[in-house]
Amino acid sequence: MKLAFTMGWLKFAIGWGAVFLFRLIPFRPPNFEPMLATIMPFSKRFGLLGSFLFGFLGIVMFDAVTSGWGVWTAVTAIAYGVLGAGSCLFFKNREATVRNFLSFGIVGTLFYDAVTGLTIGPIFQGQSFMVALTGQIPFTLMHLLGTVVFATLLSPVLYRWVVTSEQLELGALFPALSKTVSKG
């Protein structure tokens, strides 16, 4: 598994790049983003650590470039990291199908929005729980809509064309480097 993670770094860059670029689209509806839909197919291949790091570092790197780091970075990065690990466990004995992407995506989105939307405001900004809850409902509905769209369209494509692609393995692109990595 360690070698697969080492050899698959280009795939991680493609996944992070796709999420990053989509999240930079101006006037995009809030919470309509492909992070979880990208984590799920990657988790099928890259194990607990790789899946956790995909979600965690995806948020840390995005915030570093856009808004800067804050308490929200820690909460959202950990939440997406946990979703990555949970996705790895969910897909361990399941096929990478639209139905499974939707099943985990919907539950994962509800978990993520409960953890982030109901904690950051009340704990760190003195917001009442009821205000956070009522304000979170429309955002969660939009997030669920995004999850359904991306889990249906993006997750299967990423799994087939990126995650399982042998041509995107470091060893396929640079055979001499592959021999060096496998010896060390």
Image (cartoon, grey):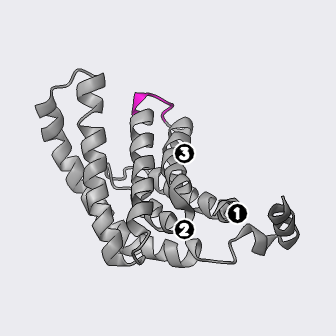
Q: Residues within 10 Å of mark 3 (few under 14, many from 20)?
A: some
Read off the magenta span.
Answer: 67-72
Which amino acid type corresponds to the residue marked 3 in the rendered image?
Leu
> Percent from the top left, x then y, of residue 22?
47, 57
Q: Identify which residue, 164 or 70, lies in the foreground.
A: 164
* Residue at position x 56%, y 63% in the image: 46
Marks 2/1: CA distance?
Answer: 12 Å
Q: Which residue was labeled with disc 1?
A: 3
Mark 1 or mark 3: whose residue is earlier in sequence? 1
Residue 54's disc number? none
Which amino acid type corresponds to the residue marked 2 in the rendered image?
Arg
* Residue at position x 39%, y 75% in the image: 94
Mark 2 or mark 1: whose residue is earlier in sequence? 1
User: Residue 71 in magenta?
Assistant: yes
Q: Which residue was labeled with disc 2?
A: 45
Q: Which residue was labeled with disc 3?
A: 57
Which amino acid type corresponds to the residue marked 1 in the rendered image?
Leu
Q: Residues within 10 Å of mark 2 (few under 14, many from 20)?
A: many
Q: Secondary structure at mark 1?
A: helix
Q: Secondary structure at mark 3?
A: helix
